[in-house]
Image: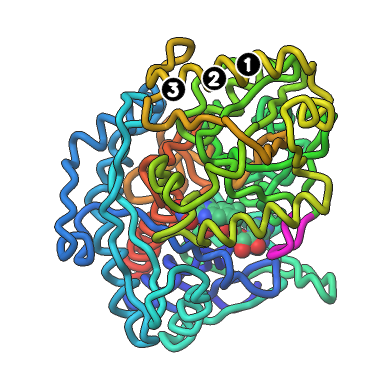
Amino acid sequence: MEKEYDVVIIGASNAGGFAAAAAAEKGAKVLMIDKMKSAGYLYRDTIASIGSKAQRKAGVEIDKQELINFLTEFAQDNVDQRLLNTWVDNSAETIDWLDEKILRPHGAHIQATPDAYYESAMNRSFPTGNEVTNSDGTYWESGYGNWVLDEIKKLGAELRWQTKLQSLVVIDGKVVGVKVEDLPTKRSYKISAKNVIICTGGYGSNLALMQKWNPMGLKTNVYSDSMRDDGSGIVAGLKAGAAKDEEAASIVFNRAAVPVGANARDMYEIDMTPPDDPAYLWFGSYPFLRVNLEGERFYNESSPYQFAMHAAARQTGYMQAMIWNEDVMDDEHLKAVHTLGCSRLGFPGIWTAEEGREQIAGLIKENLVQKADSIEELADKLNLPVATLIKTVSRYNDLCHKGKDEDFGKEAYRMLAIDQGPYYGAFMSGRLLATLDGLRINTKMQVLRENGEVIPGLYAAGNCSGGFFWGAYPDHVPGLTASHAQTFGRLAGKFAATASQD
Ligand SMILES: Cc1cc2nc3c(=O)[nH]c(=O)nc-3n(C[C@H](O)[C@H](O)[C@H](O)COP(=O)(O)OP(=O)(O)OC[C@H]3O[C@@H](n4cnc5c(N)ncnc54)[C@H](O)[C@@H]3O)c2cc1C
């Protein structure tokens, strides 16, 4: 076995990076490995917290208990509330660390996003978002993940890329190291560790595991946006005796444009290399009219992202089409229908409405968005029944003008009429960003066996760990997955480092 480390961390993304920094800050001898050549771009820009310095400065106040109750209700109690409490109590410290230690030395900073305005119970929301803000005041894409990785090296930790965890080395029920493969040379070797932290993300790109653990996810999504997530860390934990969440959880965007005639049940594409992910239709997260393949409206489109796929799962081909017009794509309308977190166009979203329209122009060229001068022509291009679509749009417009959605109860201010052309339409489905069910852990991030016993020497954090989400992702608590990974990563690093010194 190779020389002993206090803490070996598997995976160098949100959970792993924050774990490595925290363990190294505590003086532990740390090694972090990742199977890929880099991970910096995976560090996300909308990150949740309660009570960060930036939030306090912006006057954002969130009632902790109210949020915990909401998250518990959203998951129908299929969570470990002690983990929710742990996140609530530690999220601000994590954001403040990121702000002060990583961003500010590079001229960037955290800015709280106070707005979380919706009117319906289904859209209950909390202003948890913190945005990574560049020195010029723009948002996103600072590449701060690489700054975290640099800081980890400065703190004396070692990083090894293209090194893949194969299995955990277990002696007498205790994890004492890892067996890894150096991918370029295919050489396998063992590394001895007092403690191992698995931070390998989910399993959304492993078809066999998706079939086993999240078959509905396979049917209702058409793209996997996390091509690295092969579930290997979770499987290694299970082989070492760990328990796992028994039901699926995932985060899904409702903004995948797919070719007319596609059937979500039979389509699941994984092989995408960011930043060239195909078919992102940013407007897809806005509450525009959606119809099934029979041309009928079938649900209230104003809901958390993922609900769109749940609704579509009861329709032909697990599919739906979105119908909108030129008028609704301007800043004024988009501001009125407002979304949260990274679905926003306009402040502080990734793009302006203008850039969103440019994206649509590109998708028209790719034949993923159809444009037409009349609803008849649009129905024809979308292969939807013409008479039914005309009737549906007419009924929808009547309700918009009335200011009351008598059919499905969408908030009046989110009912935007589609009165005049040009008209647009696209077949829409889900993009699975990540799976969120994983290994059972306690509030010290220690991995547990089925009988509740701790597996000595083994920790897990981020999307490979469980107990925190169930079913759909509560996207109206913006930034919760990145924060879950970073906050629990940081805690795992501290606990594992301290345990190594015992
Ligand atoms: C396009 C997109 C945008 C997103 N935006 C946001 C956002 O703004 N806010 C938010 O809260 N969430 C966002 N998310 C979700 C967020 O990215 C994830 O929840 C988060 O990355 C989880 O972090 P993680 O460290 O647990 O796992 P991951 O980020 O999945 O990282 C796992 C790491 O482990 C490595 N690895 C895996 N297996 C092995 C192995 N066997 N050996 C060695 N290394 C291994 C991988 O290479 C990878 O680097 C977004 C997701 C996507 C796809």
Q: Which of marks 1 and 3 is nearer the N terminus?
A: 1
| Residue closer to the observer: 381 or 244 | 381
- Dots 2, 1 in contact, CB < 8 A: yes
Of residue 40 and residue 139, the one placed in the foreground of this image is 139
> Mark 2 or mark 3, which is nearer the start of the sequence?
2
What kind of element bears circle 3? helix
At a point 25% along the width and 30% down the height, the residue shown is: 69
Q: On the image, numbered disc 1 is attached to which residue?
A: 392
| Residue ID for mark 2 | 396
For the residues bearing labels 3 and 2, Cβ distance under 8 angstroms: no
Residue drawn where x is 47% and y is 14% of the image: 408
**Residue 196 seen from this side:** no
Q: Residues within 10 Å of mark 1 (few under 14, many from 20)?
A: some
Marks 2 and 1, how far apart at CA: 6 Å
Type of residue at label 3?
Answer: His
Q: Name the residue under label 3.
A: 401
Location of residue 38 in the rendering, given as x and y in whole percent from the top left corner: 64, 74
**Crowd class of label 2 (few under 14; some 14 to 19; many from 20; radius 10 Å):** many
Q: Which residue is drawn at 34% across and 63% down?
A: 499
Query: Is residue 56 left or right of 215 when viewed as pictured?
Result: left
Q: Quadrant of the C terminus?
A: bottom left
Q: Main secondary structure of the magenta part?
A: loop
Residue 358 percent across, percent down from the top left? 66, 59
> Looking at the rendering, in which quadrant would you find the N terminus?
bottom right
Q: Give the range drawn in magenta.
A: 272-278
Label 3, residues with CA under 10 Å away: few <14, some 14-19, many ≥20: some
Q: Mark 2: which amino acid?
A: Tyr
Judged by depth in the image, the label closer to the viewer, 3 or 2, is: 3
Separation of marks 3 and 2 at Cα, in angstroms: 9 Å
In the displayed structure, 133 sits above or below 490; it is below
